[in-house]
Image: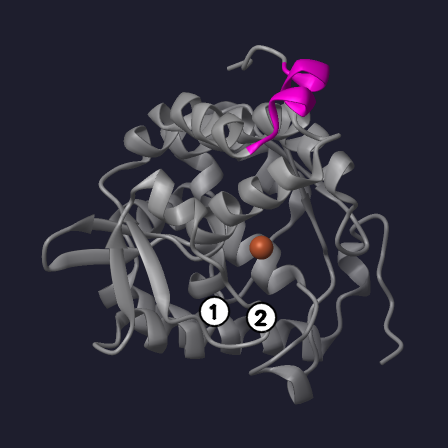
Amino acid sequence: MQRKKPLVQDYAAYTTEDFHVWRLLFERQMELLKDYASPLYLSCIEKVNFNATEIPHFGKTNALLKELTGWQLSVVPELVPQKEFFELLAQKIFPATCWLRTMAELDYIEEPDMFHDVFGHVPLLANEAYANFMEGFGKLALQWIDVPEAISLLGRIYWFTIEFGLLGNGADINIYGAGILSSIEECRSAVGVHSKKYDFDIDTLLSTTYRTDVLQDKYFVIASFEQLYESLAEIDKIVRGYIDVDIIQKYAAPVAK
Ligand SMILES: [Fe+2]
């Protein structure tokens, strides 16, 4: 499908359909998420002032995030190359699209649009420990950017945390992954009894594969965003264990936090 993918957010260019799509998706997701999302995510939705009637305005969101954690959004037309993505995270910049899916695509869209990027990813950038993890993860990934095996392993970390992570303890488990928060079907799967929930164990996670083209059925549950942030050094250590010594000698660099 041919669509416009702007390089800057021209707020006046949003159509009535765009506002309608945002409202429908926002209201539908929040109806589910009020029961199933992490309370931390729900409080961050308020901190960044997202609501059903207003498509998020990047300038306003950036002003709020700047005060809260120093993070900023930058507009990208679509997925950015890995190296650029990690460089941005390391500088506390989250790349996000500013275009929305159409009504015909309400339930499924192949590439990430603004509802995924902004509704899913942005609110928790207002949470300090989560934001610190994102920054640290970007820096860690940059250390390994020339080692595809390591980047592939780090991709699993990102997938099972930032995209499809759950948070909680015992029976009290909630959603924080953007891929779940922004999809009604992923929400249902994540909270359903048939999906498997594992404790956040980095060794187990790094040996767990995933598919991007099906609903997820395996999740890793962190106890807190502080735990996630504190795990960065261990992630680096375990990734080193997977990589050939020769490659490590060529590329090994200390972890920058
Ligand atoms: Fe995403």
| Residue at the farthest left position | 170
Measuring from the top left, give residue 199's x and y in whole percent: 24, 49
Magenta-drawn stretch, dominant element (helix, strand or loop): helix
Between the residue at mark 1 and the residue at mark 2, the CA separation in whole angstroms equals 6 Å
Quadrant position of ligand 1: bottom right
Q: Is residue 91 visible?
A: no
Q: Residue at x 42, y 73 (%)?
A: 186
Question: Is 251 included in the stretch rendered in magenta?
Answer: yes
Give the residue type at disc 1: Phe
242 versus 45 height, above or below: above
- Identify the magenta region: 243-252
Rendered-image quadrant of the N terminus: bottom right
Q: Is residue 88 left or right of residue 44?
A: right
Question: Is 202 included in the stretch rendered in magenta?
Answer: no
* Circle number at residue 22: 2
For mark 2, give the secondary structure.
helix
User: In which quarter of the view is residue 88 placed?
Assistant: top right
